[in-house]
Amino acid sequence: MGQPLIEDDYLGRRIAGESRSNTQGPVLLSVVVPCFNEEAILRETHRRLVATLEAVPDLDFELVYIDDGSRDATLNVLRELQHADARVRVLALSRNFGQQMAVTAGLQCAAGDAVVVIDADLQDPPEVIPEMLDRWRKGADVAYGVRTKREGETRFKRWTASAFYRLLARLTDISIPLDTGDFRLMDRAVVNAFLAMPERDRFVRGMVAWLGFRQEPVPYRRAARVAGETGWPLRNMLRLATDGLVSFSLLPLRLATWLGLLAAGLALSGIVYALVLRLCTAAWVSGWTSLLIAVLFLGGVQLLMLGLLGEYVGRIYGEVKHRPLYLVEERLGFPPTSRRAVQEETTE
Ligand code: UDP
Ligand code: MG
């Protein structure tokens, strides 16, 4: 990893904060849409995206749909859309790799000067994209959607999500904006920097926050899912939460030190107490209750820390295997030679 991470003419091309004028003709926007079992809604999503983007002046766009190993007819619908509209690109992964990987795959083959990532289920309204573009044209490098209101989500999901973001903000060194999902616009420079990050446990919103650059919030109301079901059962949400914590914070590892100190402190005061009792009075600390409590407490702490250690070691194992992040089974609608081809050669 001796070479410079990002060799790119996009970096440093622009003076920071300078607005992007469109004197050089229309810009190209890529919209990356990860899709997992979304057959019921994709046509509507496509219709709304196209209607919104066609209304924006001085804009060319491409729609990059990633089929993340769907088990329903999603891929067929995508093929149909591609057939009818040359601006559609379809990338089908060989199996379900998860939303974060699907987004990564999409970013990797997007060719735009700016790239928007948006969910397929219309929970993130495409109508917000023009505002993100506006921010970008005025000089922002990242325009991220902030949910001001969440509709159609259970109280449990809203509560856990909010608690998680706040915990993450406290535990990590970087500040991930609260109530932010993956709905965002990124400048080409940011996308390239993102793609230069090779890690396997991809917590996209954390990684983008880590990158820095000029990031601006764009508030919007998060609508209810129009059709289909959430592909994120509790188990996956927990996994994403662990990824977020473990990838961005070493604090859990330090917990061992603090718990060790606490246990030692307790033990010490116990010893003093027992000695004082024995030497100064006729009574003494008795029985196996105290013994058992001490043994169980220490045993519990040790197992907990072993588990945490395992979490990190497991991730190191995952990284050193150096498997590809995802596998592509089919691609449709991509022009044969373009910047993306060069990109893939250098990053894959
Ligand atoms: N998704 C995906 N792979 C998965 C799960 C989800 O590509 O394994 C996509 C899904 O099609 C949607 C987006 O990721 O476009 C967000 O998923 P979902 O709506 O299920 O998540 P939620 O909105 O409940 O957080
Ligand atoms: Mg959703």
Image (tube, rainbow, N blue to C red):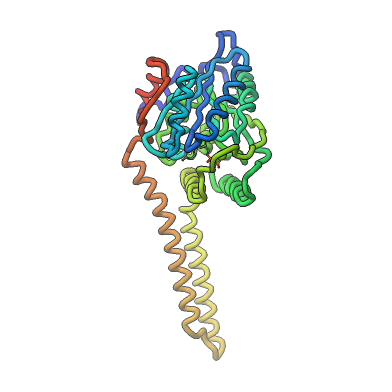
Q: Which residue ends up furthest to the bottom in the rendered image?
A: 282
Above or below for 27 versus 300: above
> Of residues 21 and 341, which is closer to you in this image?
341
On the question of residue 170 being in view, the answer is: no
Indicate left or right for 100 with 16 as reference. Answer: left
Q: Is residue 63 above or below residue 210?
A: above
Left or right, residue 213 beside residue 100? right
Point out residue 210 in the picture as x, y percentages from the top left corner: 52, 35
67 is higher (above) or lower (below) than 232: above
Does 96 sit above or below residue 27?
Answer: below
Q: How many marks?
A: 0
* Res 150 visible: yes
Of residue 83 and residue 97, the one placed in the foreground of this image is: 83
- Residue at the (61%, 52%) spot, across then down: 156
Which part of the image, by quadrant, shows the C terminus? top left
Q: Quadrant of residue 90?
A: top left
**Residue 231, x across and y down, in percent:** 50, 43
Whole-percent x and y of residue 125? 62, 31
Position of residue 11 measured from the top left corner of the image (x, y, whole percent): 49, 20
* Residue at left offset 59%, top offset 8%: 23
The residue sitting at 62% across, 22% down in the picture is: 52
Q: Quick one: quadrant of the N terminus?
A: top left
